[in-house]
Amino acid sequence: MSFQTGHIGLNVSDLDRSRDFYVKVFGFEIVNESDREDRRFALLGFDGALVLTLWQQSEGRFATGLPGLHHLSFQVPDIEAVRRAESVVRELGATLHHDGVVPHGEGASSGGIFFEDPDGIRLEISAPNGAGDRPAPTTGAPTCGFF
């Protein structure tokens, strides 16, 4: 038996704000959404395939000190795609860690950007190659522990 992630569901505090953020940064299409006051959600994906569900059913900010999600990572084919996403993240004024593209570790070619969505959920967009020209962050654990 093998498993693969189906889709990811995130609780958000403001559906409109989060939906717009994820559509702009990742280029997601809105597959479906509900505006019912008691059940607000947006299903986001590509070509009709669901990738991410946003549920408006929380308040406050993402709690990094509690058990649960550490960060959500998306891989793109090349570093140019990471840099395009970085431009959008900067344009939106989102919190960007490490001032841009960094490798996953000292001597690694893979890497990307690490940032937060409007609710403080930690996100990564990375590529398998092309980040080795930048120094690795000195804080956090190796690989994806850069927060």
Image (tube, rainbow, N blue to C red):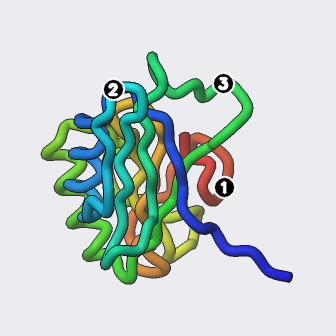
Task: Tell whether 118 sits left or right of 61.
Answer: left
- Sequence-first disc among 2 and 3: 2
Q: Which mark is residue 47?
A: none
Q: Quadrant of the N terminus?
A: bottom right
User: In x, y percent, where is residue 84?
Assistant: 21, 66
Where does label 2 land, which residue? 37
Residue in the picture at 54% in, 62% down: 7
128 or 71, which is in the foreground?
Answer: 71
Where does label 1 land, which residue? 142
Q: Quadrant of the C terminus?
A: top right
78 or 40, which is in the foreground?
Answer: 40
User: In x, y percent, where is residue 29?
Assistant: 25, 64
Residue 131: image quadrant is bottom left
Q: Residues within 10 Å of mark 2 (few under 14, many from 20)?
A: few
Q: Marks 2 and 3, Cα distance to the nearest angstrom?
A: 30 Å
Task: Tell whether 67 sits left or right of 8.
Answer: right
Where does label 3 land, which residue? 65
Q: Amino acid at mark 1?
A: Pro
